[in-house]
Amino acid sequence: MNGIKKDLIYLLACAVNDTAPDAEKVKAMDIENLYSLCKAHTIRAAVYVPLEKAGAADEKFIQAYNKAVRKNILLDSEREAITAEFEERGIWYLPMKGVILKELYPRSGMREMSDNDILYDPAFQKDVMDIMVARGYTAVSVGKLADDVYKKPPVMNFEMHTRLFSYDTKELHDYYQDPKRLLKPDEGRKSGCRLSDEDFYVYMTAHEYKHYSCGGTGIRSLLDCYIFMKAKGSSIDRGYISEQMKQLGIEEYEQERLALAMKLFSSPEIPELTEAEEKLLDSFLDYGTYGTISNAADNAMKNYESRSGDSSKAGFVRARLFPDHDYMKHIYPRLCRYKALLPVGYVCRWVKGLIVNRTKITAEVKALKKHDKK
């Protein structure tokens, strides 16, 4: 682990444990490069807190933190207004992910939010669109993916989910095909729902694994894991969680990620990591908050090899060009309802790829070339 990464881990450990850092140690840090790394991982507001305690927060960190606080307040207020309309119309809903996690951090605004995610009853998709448009939002994407995207300048961004996972991640999709079985009434609300602490952690981990196994995910995921366990770890049912991880096929990932998170952040002292832990940490540090397209392409090939046992380039290309009927039926439900219409669906997929996903295709071609070199 190089110097700037050690500095980051040290400051994050101070942040999540509400500990003042050593001012002399902070004074020797490269704040400019630290800021760039924090920006890539959407953790500037978290790192601001210990820098402030050390009297070393520069203007960029101060602005990032103040912006995070303001945005969280605005998103919270808007979410309450939106869900109040859901309550009036009897639409069940579940605030998700960062909406819940940010409340566990030691200080308001420490967890930066790019958007708010809400799962809702898909039978009311048209009603939800009417609510959002009436509130001044642009419907960027509705009915095309697992989530509907609504935006309103300057900072409002809501992802309204009709499903928790798309068919691209089949094991996760199948487990969460009926999310309502996991929902509990949110006290004091008619239509609002919540997850148990155990099911929230399982979903949080599954969602994180989706990103990790695709384009990658950043160190904020490790931070979220530590924050959750610090708050809930003594009361949750680990046996239940372990069983769900087995069903999802991510038990090994969950155990390794949890162990690393606890080792990194339980104390400001930089821990000695094993070679395997160093490698896992690098996988979180190297790709930023949302990963990279090139890493997604590399992982797509690895995942294909793992599932099929076929390491040939031709097999991967064939699978990408001609997915099976179950996959196509989920991606194009109307068009590919019957197998006879598969050829039409394939043509639509290819055209969409060339027009919309050209960057992704280019990345996969590069991944194939790297595969040849290996």
Image (cartoon, grey):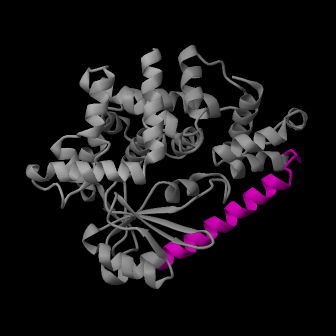
* In this picture, residue 115 sits left or right of residue 333: right
Q: Nearer the viewer, residue 71 or 363?
A: 363
Q: What are the residue bounds of the magenta stretch? A: 54-81
Q: State left or right for residue 61 relative to residue 262.
A: right
Q: Main secondary structure of the magenta part?
A: helix
> Residue 79 colored magenta?
yes
Q: Is residue 326 left or right of residue 215?
A: left
Quadrant where the image shows the N terminus = top right
Can the viewer see residue 331? yes
Q: x, y (%) of residue 6?
A: 73, 29
Q: Say which residue appears at 85% left-offset and 37% top-offset.
A: 26
Q: Position of residue 338 (x, y in %)?
A: 9, 54
Q: From the image, which quarter does the C terminus lie in?
A: top left
Q: On screen, 113 above or below 207?
A: below
Where is residue 330? Give x, y as percent.
Answer: 23, 52
Q: Residue at x 31, y 20 (%)?
A: 312
- Between 346 and 103, the residue placed more toward the observer is 346
Residue 243 lies, in percent from the top left, at 29, 34
> Which residue does the image show at 57% across and 53% down from the upper left?
104
Camera sees residue 166: no
On the image, which quarter does residue 123 sit in? Answer: bottom left
Observer-nearest of 107 and 116: 116
Q: Please indicate whether residue 87 sits to the left or right of residue 135 in the image.
A: left
Residue at (68%, 56%) from the top-left corner?
107
Is residue 143 within the magenta segment?
no
